[in-house]
Image (cartoon, rainbow, N blue to C red):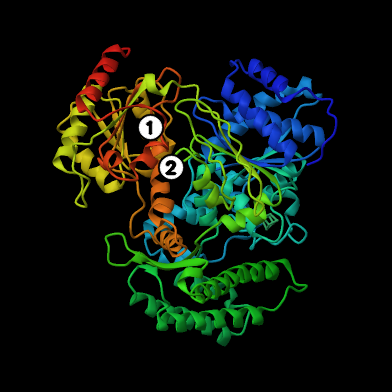
Amino acid sequence: MPSSISTLPSVRDLLSHAVEAVGGAEREGQVRMAEAVAKAIRTGEHLAVQAGTGTGKSLAYLVPAIRYAVEHEATVVVSTATIALQRQLVDRDLPRLAKALKKPLGREPTFAILKGRRNYLCMHRVHTGAPEEPEDTGLFDAFAVSRIGREVKRLHEWSSDTETGDRDELVPGVSEQAWRQVSVTARECLGVARCPVGTDCFAERARGEAGRADVVVTNHALLAIDALQEYQVLPEHDLVVIDEAHELVDRVTSVATSELTTSLISAATRRCGRLIDADIADRLLEAGDGLALVLDDLPPGRMDTLPTPLGGALTVVRDAAHGCLTALGSERKEDIEEATARKLARSLLDEVHDTAVRLLDAFDEDQAHRQDVVWLSGDQYSASPRPPALHVAPLSVGGLLRERVFARSTTVLTSATLALGGAFDTLARQWGLPPSPKPTVKAEGTATDKPAPSDDDGPRWSGLDVGSPFDYRKHGILYVAKHLPPPGRDGLGERTLDEIAELIDAAGGRALGLFSSMRAAKQATEELRDRVKHPILCQGDDSTSLLVSKFADDPRTCLFGTLSLWQGVDVPGPSLQLVIVDRLPFPRPDDPVSSARQRAVEARGGNGFLTVAATHAALLLAQGTGRLHRSVTDKGVVAVLDSRLATARYGGFLRASLPPLWPTHDPKVARDALRRLDAAAPA
Ligand code: SF4
């Protein structure tokens, strides 16, 4: 990072100025975080910083990042996991901050949002229409076809109104099938130089604006694509801030996962059919049919060895796709229609070929040294059948992040949940950072700042926990139902349902039920709707955002649901005073990626369960617990009805990952507290 004597105000002064301008108060954790980010920028040492809800962490990283960008005429990348945070940064934080910092910085800082090409309307595709898509083969449902037709018509109308072409700005949204017909992947894009409407291209415009901006807000998926691809997707940058960093590994893993289906092979064949010799295209179609027959005979699940018939079928697919690619030839001078058809065909053929190669290669090494895990999904015999699909995912993304993110830019990783079991090491290992010799231990409710100098074998980094302005011990109880039997496989037991009913009655509603499966959420809803006198909403009854706003509007209403609610509910005030967790959120034992990761850790002599499954549970449990306190005045109870949190050996690790609530095993203490809060809440 360049260093020079700066004429700009210090980060501390800029932060005070910004906080005053947006009408806030100075917070100790925010100042400490801003100074640590400034130090990371100065020294080039990566930083992991845990900042609890209420710290004001976006200002704490944006102020030093903007200062750096303005001083050095550089672009800084800020990456988020969710659209909600992206919107908050672009619609609220950055506009206010840009105005506030204009005077002290001498000019107004600029910002832009950048997403993957697939997120923008492709005007070339809008003008020329779409070729057949992979999903088309499955669309025998006339209703679905006409719905998609109506959506595509709406997208065409929208194309003349929108200024950004950004899918997220289309309200209400459209189905994936409809969107595919008006968008392209980076592989399918003709390239701005060849495209007849390249000057009007939304994706290119967004890229251009991003290249000129001081701050570019993007998502973890695009950050991963930028790391994976040889070509540059994000503007040149040497500082990246990864917010919601607890999601980084999952998001990068899903970008690095490939999928092969027979409908993808059929679509590739159709796309190249009229461009090459029919015999060569037919060979690919037959290879797809052969693969379909083999997949029909295989059980879904993780594959530790390559079944011989599957190996044979994949080899035939790989060679047939290669034959089509060779017949398609390299790019040549041709009219734009021909060039478009060739580009679209090549993109799918490449996908089929490369995935077949990767699937075959995945079994080359002995199990202990494999890089990828392969599994078959799909269920043709269920009420909502899904066709078989082969997936191949990386066992670790640490190497990729280390070589393509940490080696290129100073990186600040932040979230309310990073120090699992009180230390950053668990997540640092997953990110590809070396272990810290001195773990950063969180003192209860206070911030600790123990630099964690790295060894010589990897990027240098330090960890910092700035705590939270919330007084968790005074404002919250962690009630663990130690007296209940450990949860079984057959749904929620009667005693657990009784506990939920009693807790909700004591709280007067106001409950968010976070269940480990949709099945459990539905069972609890059905069985308790008649037993408690307060309304219960269940995820899936309506759109999640509508359910959350109904829940927030009526304090007596309860909301039950699963995964997206663990992280996505932000309801301050008396509508949410009770969070119920039915069981510890371990990954399912048959989850192919976590089970393979667990085994890989064990093969290296580590504790697979603690490293993979307990880490996953700790992250989610901390996120779920965090739903209770959204403002300084929020009070309530987190009730964990899984006794293993109190009794199991790993319980201490999980509890140390949570905010420091006041602990109890006594149900009466929890219910009495809820009754008092209910009585004190505004009518
Ligand atoms: S440049 Fe690519 S994305 Fe843009 S309009 Fe042309 S084909 Fe579509």
- Residue 618 point in image, percent of width and height: 40, 42
Q: Where 125 sits versus 27, above or below?
A: below
Residue 368, position as x, y percentages in the image: 47, 69
Please name the residue that numbered disc 2 is placed on: 619
From the viewer's side, name the closer residue of 313 and 303.
303
Q: In which quarter of the image is residue 657?
A: top left
Q: Name the residue at 41% across, 59% down.
A: 598
Q: How crowded is mark 1: few (under 14 residues within 10 Å), some or many (20 or more)?
A: many
Residue under the point 58% across and 73% down: 349
Q: Position of residue 86 (x, y in %)?
A: 57, 37
**Ligand 1 closer than 8 Å to the CB at disc 1?**
no
Give the structural element (helix, strand or loop) at label 1.
helix
Which residue, given by chain and number where applicable, does mark 1 sit on? Answer: 548
Quadrant hosting ligand 1: bottom right
Q: Distance between the residues labelled 1 and 2?
A: 22 Å
Please identify the quarter of the rendering in which residue 66 is found. top right
Left or right position of 376 against 464: left
Q: Is mark 2 within 8 Å of ligand 1?
A: no
Give me the residue at 76% from left, 50% from top. Answer: 199
Tell me how many marks there are: 2
Using the image, determine if residue 464 lies above or below residue 408.
above
Q: Residues within 10 Å of mark 2 (few under 14, many from 20)?
A: many
Front residue of 589 and 211: 589
Three-letter residue code for mark 2:
Leu
Q: Which comes before the other along the chain, label 1 or label 2?
A: 1
Quarter of the figure that contains the N terminus: top right
Badge 1 amino acid: Val
Residue 79's label in the rendered image is: none
Foreground disc of the pair 1, 2? 2
Vertical side of 80 occupied by 263: above or below: below
Taking the view exactly as shown, the residue that stands out farthest to the bottom is 279
Q: Measuring 38% from the left and 54% from the top, which residue is drawn there?
A: 609
